[in-house]
Amino acid sequence: MQYAIWFETVDLYRRIGPMLAALPGLFRFDTIKIGTPEHTAYTGGDWDGFPMPNESRTIFVFERDISATYAGGALGLEGGSRAAVRALPQDSDDAVFLRLWHELLHTLDLDADGMKQRVLQWLPLPLLPTFALYCLALQADTPHWHRQYYQWVTEQAVREDV
């Protein structure tokens, strides 16, 4: 799918923009802009202040400090395939990249949250004991495992021609 992507600042574009080429080809960006797209800032609760773009197929990468609990959010196909991702200075580039990939999966209604529940589907059997140890140590939510899971979800989507 093709998206327009907005970076709130030039510095944010310089930091995150080069990572776009590392995303799988399922996600393409036909428009890259600096600034703030038209958006709705949610109010109240866990999403307070979260800036969701109004335009379909629009992604917004921002760094403003908001009170929302979440650092990323997306609306799927029925919601216009749009998302926003917060990229704070203290976030590692890898964390921001994976957060962006995660939300892009959600824009296509793909299961970006099923890493642990679907482990028998995506993880090669010889790695299952290692993953189980990471889960027991509460260390499964690492870039290493997320990258492998997101790659599998993306490959499944391509096979199913999403």
Image (cartoon, helix red, strand yellow):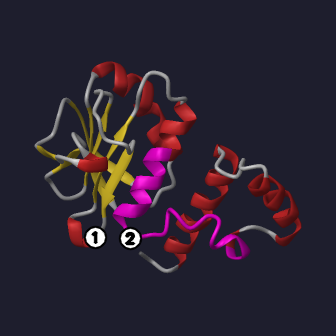
x 62%, y 53%: residue: 146
Count numbered badges in the picture. Answer: 2
Q: What stretch is highlighted in magenta?
A: 99-121
Residue 4 in sight: no
Amino acid carrying label 1: it is: Leu
Left or right of 98: which side holds 51?
Answer: left
Dot label at residue 109: 2
Q: Indicate left or right for 47 with 147 as reference.
A: left
Quarter residue 68 falls in: top left
Expressed as whole percent of the image width and height from the top left, the position of residue 84 reads 30, 46
The residue lying furthest to the front in this view is 45
The correct choice, above or below, for 62 with respect to 141 in the image is above
Residue that mark 1 sits on: 77
The kind of residue on which mark 2 rests is Asp
Q: Quadrant of residue 1?
A: bottom left
Q: Which of 88 and 69 is in front in this view?
A: 69
Residue drawn at (17%, 46%) of the image:
43
Q: Is residue 91 above or below residue 73?
A: above
State the image coordinates of residue 106 (x, y, percent, origin top left). Answer: 39, 62
Whether the residues at callouts 2 and 1 have beta carbons within 8 Å, the answer is yes
The first of marks 2 and 1 along the sequence is 1
For label 1, the SS is: helix
- Residue placed farthest to the top in the image? 11
